[in-house]
Amino acid sequence: MVVNEGRGRLFRRKDGKYLIYLPKDLAEDSMFPFKGEESVYVKVSFKLGDDKLIVERWEEKSKK
């Protein structure tokens, strides 16, 4: 069974940083876009007036 959604949580720590918790079943699903990494840099964005976050793998800009 593919798990492509779940109830997570946006949490503010005592040091002022924010964390997004993802359900284990979602993060360990075979179709989850971030595979087997303990830590990965991500780009988080949103559109004004929308209630959705977009989370993408952070791509370093290569110097040419």
Image (cartoon, helix red, strand yellow):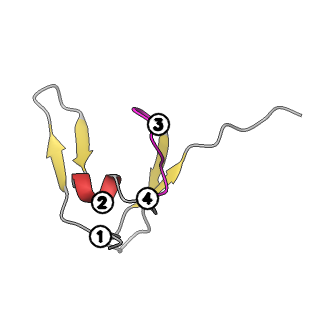
Q: Give the range drawn in magenta.
A: 32-40
Picture residue at 25% right of the left edge, 58% below the top: 25
- Residue 47: x, y in percent? 44, 68
Picture residue at 34% right of the left edge, 52% below the top: 28
Q: Element type at marker 3?
A: loop
User: Which residue is identified by label 2?
Assistant: 26
Residue 40 bears which disc, if any? 3
Q: Element type at marker 4?
A: loop
Task: Tell me if 44 is positioned left or right of 60 in this view.
Answer: left
Badge 3 amino acid: Val
Q: Do the residues labelled 4 and 1 touch (CB within 8 Å)?
A: no
2 or 14: which is nearer to us? 2
Q: Upstream in the sequence, badge 4 or badge 1?
A: 1
Residue 35 position (above or below residue 7): above
Residue 5 bears which disc, if any? 1
Q: Does the magenta stretch include residue 36?
A: yes
Q: Upstream in the sequence, badge 3 or badge 1?
A: 1
User: Which residue is identified by label 4?
Assistant: 32
- Residue 62: x, y in percent? 78, 35
Q: Report the residue that reaches farthest toward the left.
A: 14
